[in-house]
Image (cartoon, rainbow, N blue to C red):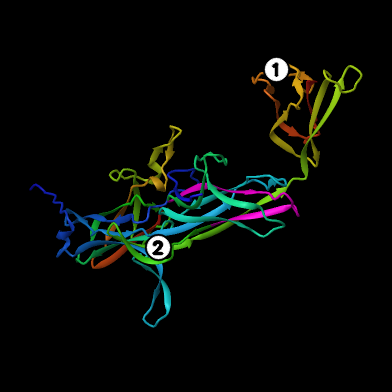
């Protein structure tokens, strides 16, 4: 029997499937609590200016009874943001790849750019156009996050 | 004089470019996964926010040391840099103020470096306001005159720069609400003038050449002008000496000399010339630094009518 691989497109088909992905851009701001006190929290930015740190949080929701495997999460990096190396956090087991064109992904150590001197140089965070997380598994009935920091240029 | 708001289109940049106010930053995530031997691809909804306006104005004095002045000198220049380190174009007012020191300079004016050459010249415009583009900077000059009578060694002038912007909530601009965050909307920096403790001196003398040494009709008179620096170590650049031919005398052709070397009467490539009723000699730099204390001697002859 021929196995047909089906690829479902569009977030609309997530409804009812029990699997979804959400992404949020957050900034540390002082917020007022219900009892009138203040505290620092990561919230949707109310005032965001150059040099501010923005945290990107992807939330993977697996409401099924099955394990997801071969998971790849991709976030394009907005041209106004600078990825902060060493800032990725998650309880999931994952590997990180980057892309210089938004399409092909590879280890950071394998990505090169040609400098003004005409020579090849290892790409740096300012060259990254997208980040990809290769996640082994996402457990059934789980809600996991993977987050990283950026700075507004 | 009519003051104008001067718009700076582009100038020397020393600041890395920040994201412009009003820019929209977007974030989206896709997930690809396998389930029951099938592959699926999902996309999150689009998450976005707007970059707000940050106001950050700075002024700094640029001269490497105090600018030297002497009593009575006009148009002495202090150079400042006014930087807009924010992410939107800003209109700032500029004002030159006496900064409280031993004596005050007179006729304080503020000019923008209109031709962007780092030097105050006739192409520069006197201003009270500037429009500086985001992440840009401009040279501004305080120009002032030294009083004829000075009591003290130093005079300080400050450049005060102000942007009227205040912290404010979303202004609707291109359909996106942009807040204003003020990091710095005022800045001042102080420049220093220092009175020279050395002077350029020109001493003129005359003597009758030949004959009985007395002055008669037809006598030949030689004039000498000695130019040197007196006082402490220093130098003057672009020194130019002019002297009128005395009345009732006639200049003797080709008699002009500098440091014993003949100069042509024509205004050509050498350092001097004669023109109708005056002689002129360019000395360039006159210095007494580095154990050089050169006295330049200019001489010319006339015949008494």
Residue pointed to by mark 1 = B264
Is B215 left or right of B141, judged from the image as shown?
Answer: right
Whether callout 2 and callout 1 share a subunit is answered: yes
Residue pointed to by mark 2 = B180
Rendered image quadrant of residue A141: bottom left
Residue at position x 68%, y 20% from top? B270
Q: Secondary structure at mark 1?
A: loop
Residue situated furthest left in the rendering: A1
Magenta-highlighted residues: B134-160
Query: Which chain letter matches label 1?
Result: B
Q: State whether the magenta stretch is mostly helix, strand or loop.
A: strand
Mark 2 against mark 1, which lies toward the viewer?
1
Up-down relation of residue B115 to residue A133 (above or below)? above
Is A18 left or right of A86, judged from the image as shown?
Answer: left
Image location of residue B132, percent across then percent down? 45, 50
In this view, the residue in front, A153 or B279, is B279
Near mark 1 (Cα within 10 A), the count class, few <14, some 14-19 or many ≥20, is some
Specify which label sits upstream in the sequence, 2 or 1.
2
Q: CA distance from mark 2 to mark 1?
A: 68 Å
Image location of residue B303, percent across then percent down? 79, 19
Is residue B298 within the magenta segment? no
Up-down relation of residue B97 to residue A124 (above or below)? below
Residue situated furthest right in the rendering: B212
């Amino acid at each position: 029997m021929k196995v047909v691989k089906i690829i479902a497109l569009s977030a609309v088909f997530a409804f009812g499937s029990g699997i979804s992905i959400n992404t949020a851009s957050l900034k540390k701001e002082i917020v007022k609590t219900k009892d009138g006190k203040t505290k620092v929290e990561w919230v949707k930015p109310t005032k965001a200016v150059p040099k501010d740190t923005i945290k990107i949080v992807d939330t993977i929701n697996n409401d099924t009874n099955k394990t997801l495997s071969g998971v790849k999460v991709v976030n394009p990096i907005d041209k106004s943001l600078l990825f902060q190396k060493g800032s990725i956090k998650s309880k999931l087991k994952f590997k990180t790849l980057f892309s210089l064109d938004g399409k092909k992904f590879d280890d950071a150590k394998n990505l090169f750019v040609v400098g003004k001197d005409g020579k090849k140089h290892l790409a740096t965070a300012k060259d990254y156009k997208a980040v990809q997380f290769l996640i082994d598994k996402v457990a059934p009935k789980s809600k996991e996050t993977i987050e990283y920091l950026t700075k507004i240029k | 004089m009519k003051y104008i708001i001067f718009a700076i289109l582009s100038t020397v940049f020393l600041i890395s470019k920040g994201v412009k106010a009003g820019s929209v930053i977007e974030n989206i995530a896709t997930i690809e996964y396998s389930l029951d031997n099938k592959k699926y691809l999902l996309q999150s909804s689009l998450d976005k926010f707007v970059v707000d306006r940050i106001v950050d104005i700075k002024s700094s004095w640029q001269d490497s040391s105090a600018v030297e002045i002497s009593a009575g000198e006009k148009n002495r220049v202090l150079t400042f840099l006014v930087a807009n380190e924010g992410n939107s174009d800003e209109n700032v007012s500029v004002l030159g103020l006496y900064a409280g020191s031993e004596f005050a300079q007179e006729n304080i004016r503020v000019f923008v470096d209109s031709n962007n050459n780092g030097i105050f010249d006739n192409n520069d415009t006197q201003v009270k306001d500037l429009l500086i583009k985001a992440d840009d900077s401009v040279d501004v000059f305080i120009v002032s005159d030294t009083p004829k009578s000075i009591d003290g060694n130093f005079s300080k002038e400050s450049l005060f720069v102000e942007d009227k912007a205040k912290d404010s909530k979303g202004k609707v601009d291109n359909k996106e609400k942009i807040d204003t965050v003020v990091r710095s909307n005022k800045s001042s920096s102080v420049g220093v003038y220092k009175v020279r403790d050395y002077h350029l001196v020109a001493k003129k003398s005359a003597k009758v050449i030949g004959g009985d040494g007395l002055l008669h009709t037809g006598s030949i008179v030689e004039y000498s002008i000695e130019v040197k620096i007196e006082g402490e170590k220093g130098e003057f650049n672009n020194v130019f000496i002019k002297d009128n031919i005395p009345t009732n005398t006639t200049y003797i052709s080709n008699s002009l000399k500098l440091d014993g070397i003949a100069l042509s009467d024509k205004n050509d490539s050498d350092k001097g010339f004669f023109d109708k009723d005056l002689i002129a000699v360019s000395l360039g730099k006159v210095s007494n630094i580095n154990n050089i204390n050169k006295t330049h001697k200019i001489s010319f002859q006339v015949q008494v009518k």
